[in-house]
């Protein structure tokens, strides 16, 4: 039985990857942080009784800032594959905790690589590093001749998160070259799902749209509506993480859809899923969106203002546009994504409408709903 170790197993990607590896017959070990409340919501459906001798998912307490803990877990589990997905992954928040992010997202990667090397596992253990399109920083002059970012384009990170992840990228490449280790970077563009963290823009939008449609919230406040992202579905992207570690030789890979969309258009598409049409008026911080038609099951007053810009969500330095070229992964690894943007928005809206309908039922039953507006 192959053995995998996943850091960040409680996150969006970690949960889908654990599902995939269990389906493939792996023994899966995951590192979770100790928290004062349960933090395993995304993997609870996979987790069996820890006393069951046949269980193939085992969780270990740990942290990417703790070398001794990581070394011990790697020694005990002797993994064939390590997926280093653990990170403080919010770009805006990285401006508030830059040192911590450098430690976790940058040095954390080194700790994993060095533990594998010191334990003499460099010929056995393959390592996947969760690199990111944030490395490119969205600089137009750094795109390739066709207007995309690919594996040959230079990096110019625009946040403490991006800068920490660039250390993770290069240290992974360096260990591959210096010690002949099987270590790869997946340069993944944005990927989303119904399990996406609630403060990333797509999930913030789908949650708010579901609430607005059901009368639980009046409007949504967002930052930069002009930002453009190449959004795919996390399920498609974790499949690529696994495929990357099955390739004959270790390389770095861009995973993207090759389509870019503004935040504004993502908002439009999410509202369309509940039959609501919007009109955007004004520019910059004065931009707002109003309901102009309601064609579905949800009745929101025509003319109602449902979106405003709040500059507190602007970033000190912004990545304006990301657009990836996944040709190498498609050609060499045979990757075929199942979801396009419309299918992604549909899946996310379905999940959030279901979730918010539960809130409506709770309200009807006299329970209080906590205010959860980011
Ligand atoms: P999430 O934020 O959903 O999950 C991050 C995971 O890392 C969580 O399990 C979190 O634990 C864990 N974590 C945070 N800090 C530490 C720490 N100090 N020690 C150990 N674990 C820690 O991220 P995603 O699943 O979306 O992303 C997975 C990885 O891919 C991340 O490295 C991210 O930077 C990268 N990435 C993501 C992209 C995307 O669009 N989703 C695109 C490109 C790269 P807890 O649950 O306790 O908070
Ligand atoms: P990003 O994702 O920074 O690309 O990083 P996020 O969804 O946070 O932002 C995308 C774009 O939307 C704009 N935006 C807002 N963003 C948030 N979070 N909240 C808002 O209210 C809002 N309004 C507009 C942002 O300015 C930005 O331009 C994600 C993370 O998953 C990283 O870990 C990963 O590496 C990259 O994707 C690829």
Image (cartoon, rainbow, N blue to C red):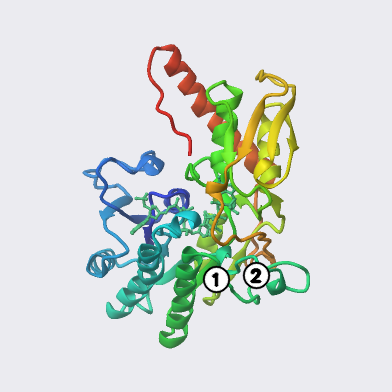
Query: Residue furthest toward the right?
Result: 146
Mark 2 Cα shell of 10 Å, populated few (<14), some (14-19), many (≥20): few
Which residue is drawn at the image coordinates 65% and 20% (left, top)? 298
| Residue contact between numbered discs 2 and 1, judged by CB atoms under 8 Å | yes
Which residue is drawn at the image coordinates 52% and 47% (left, top)? 312
Percent coordinates x, y for residue 96 in the rendering? 41, 57
* Mark seen at residue 16: none
As measured in the structure, the alpha-carbon distance from the residue carrying label 2 to the one carrying label 1 is 9 Å
**Under tag 2, what secondary structure?**
helix
Q: State whether residue 207 is above or below residue 13.
A: above
Quarter of the rendered structure image containing ligand 1? bottom left
Query: Residue furthest toward the top?
Result: 365
Quadrant in which residue 62 is drawn: bottom left
Q: Is residue 182 visible?
A: no
Query: Residue furthest toward the bottom?
Result: 178
Depth check, front residue: 153 or 125: 153
Which residue is drawn at the image coordinates 52% and 23% (left, top)? 216
Closer to the N terminus: mark 2 or mark 1? 1
Q: Please name the residue that numbered disc 1 is placed on.
A: 247
Which residue is drawn at the image coordinates 57% and 38% (left, top)? 221
Depth check, front residue: 298 or 9: 298
Percent coordinates x, y for residue 228 in the rendering? 67, 54
Quadrant in which residue 368 is drawn: top left
Q: Please name the residue that numbered disc 2 is placed on.
A: 332
Image quadrant occupied by the N terminus: bottom left
In this image, 168 relative to 308: left or right? left
Depth check, front residue: 315 or 148: 315
Percent coordinates x, y for residue 369 in the rendering? 41, 23
Mark 1 Cα shell of 10 Å, populated few (<14), some (14-19), many (≥20): few
Q: Is residue 366 visible?
A: yes
Percent coordinates x, y for residue 98 in the rendering? 40, 64
In this image, 3 relative to 245: left or right? left
């Amino acid at each position: 039985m192959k053995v995998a170790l996943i850091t960040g197993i409680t996150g969006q990607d970690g949960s889908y990857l654990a599902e995939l590896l269990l389906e493939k017959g792996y023994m899966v070990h995951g590192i979770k942080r100790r928290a004062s409340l349960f933090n395993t919501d995304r993997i609870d459906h996979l987790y069996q009784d820890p006393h069951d001798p046949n269980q193939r998912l085992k969780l270990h307490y740990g942290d990417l800032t703790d070398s001794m803990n990581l070394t011990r877990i790697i020694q005990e589990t002797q993994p064939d594959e390590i997926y280093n997905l653990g990170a403080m992954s919010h770009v805006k928040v990285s401006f508030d905790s830059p040192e911590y992010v450098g430690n976790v997202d940058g040095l954390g990667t080194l700790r994993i690589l060095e533990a594998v090397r010191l334990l003499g596992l460099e010929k056995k253990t393959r390592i996947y590093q969760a690199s990111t399109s944030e490395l490119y920083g969205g600089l137009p002059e750094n795109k390739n001749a066709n207007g995309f970012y690919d594996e040959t384009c230079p990096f110019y990170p625009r946040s403490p998160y991006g800068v920490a992840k660039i250390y993770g990228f290069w240290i992974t490449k360096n260990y591959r070259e210096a010690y002949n280790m099987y270590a790869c970077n997946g340069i993944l563009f944005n990927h989303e799902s119904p399990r996406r963290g609630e403060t990333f823009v797509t999930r913030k939008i789908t949650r708010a749209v579901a609430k607005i449609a059901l009368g639980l919230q009046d409007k949504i406040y967002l930052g930069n509506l002009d930002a453009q992202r190449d959004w795919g579905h996390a399920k498609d992207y974790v499949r690529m993480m696994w495929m990357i570690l099955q390739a004959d030789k270790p390389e770095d890979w861009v995973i993207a859809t090759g389509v870019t969309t503004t935040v504004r258009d993502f908002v439009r598409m999410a509202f369309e899923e509940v039959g609501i049409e919007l009109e955007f008026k004004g520019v910059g911080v004065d931009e707002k969106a109003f309901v102009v038609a309601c064609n579905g099951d949800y009745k929101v007053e025509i003319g109602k203002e449902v979106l405003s810009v709040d500059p507190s969500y602007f970033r000190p330095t912004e990545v304006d546009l990301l657009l990836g070229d996944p040709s190498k992964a498609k050609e060499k690894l045979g990757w075929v994504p199942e979801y396009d943007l419309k299918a992604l928005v549909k899946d996310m809206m379905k999940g959030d409408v279901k979730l918010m309908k539960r809130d409506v039922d709770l309200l009807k039953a006299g329970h209080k709903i906590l205010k959860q507006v980011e």
